[in-house]
Amino acid sequence: MTSDIPIKLDSLDKDILTELQKDATISYKDLSKKIGAAESTVYDRTRRLRQLGIIKGIVPLLDAKKCGKLTTAWIRVSIHSIQDIGRISKELAMIDELLEVHEISGEWDILVKTKVTDNEELRDLEVEKIGPIKGIKGLYSLIAVRTEKEDIRIKLESLEEQMAMNSVD
């Protein structure tokens, strides 16, 4: 089990992670040239970042539309008893069509994200896989009509580093 405590990253770690988020297929040799560090250092740091669980895996970024997944939707889930939120979240997380599962504050209890072929597939997902989970009281879907930006990369420079970069200009 990994800890949720943030791990302090130095500028080299951030440079490595930033470049890997741009292209995870980059070789250690090319990465080392790009960030100005020895190839062995880049290899060791990358291995350490994997061991620490900062790099959880390397997967290709797919174009959902080109894969036939034309509908992006968020489903707000309300539950009968807040004591069941952990169990329900875990059950939802086991549904392959769900990309994200978040316990949230406010009027609703859980927010999930999915990409499906069309509204009919969304309906089937809600009726056949989500709705039957014991303890769910209601579902409310929000469908994206257009997406301007969708990115999973995390910006890593600290505010202090941003200020230092801005003061150089």
Image (cartoon, rainbow, N blue to C red):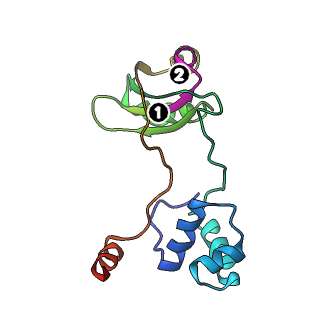
Q: Is residue 90 visible?
A: no
Percent position (x, y) of residue 80?
38, 22
Q: CA distance from mark 1 to mark 2?
A: 10 Å
Percent position (x, y) of residue 167?
27, 80
Disc 1 on helix, strand or loop? strand
Residue at 45% across / 64% down in the picture?
A: 5
Residue at 53% across / 19% down in the picture?
A: 122
- Check if mark 1's residue and mark 2's residue have beta carbons within 8 Å: yes
Q: Is residue 73 left or right of residue 68?
A: left
Q: Amino acid at mark 1?
A: Val
Q: Is residue 114 magenta?
A: yes
Mark 1 vs 2, N-terminal side: 1
* Quarter of the rendering occupied by the N terminus: bottom right
Depth check, mark 1 against mark 2: the one in front is 1
Q: Is residue 4 left or right of residue 20?
A: left
Q: Quadrant of residue 147?
A: top left
Residue that mark 1 sits on? 112
Disc 2 on helix, strand or loop? helix
Q: Is residue 50 visible?
A: yes
Q: Is residue 148 magenta?
A: no
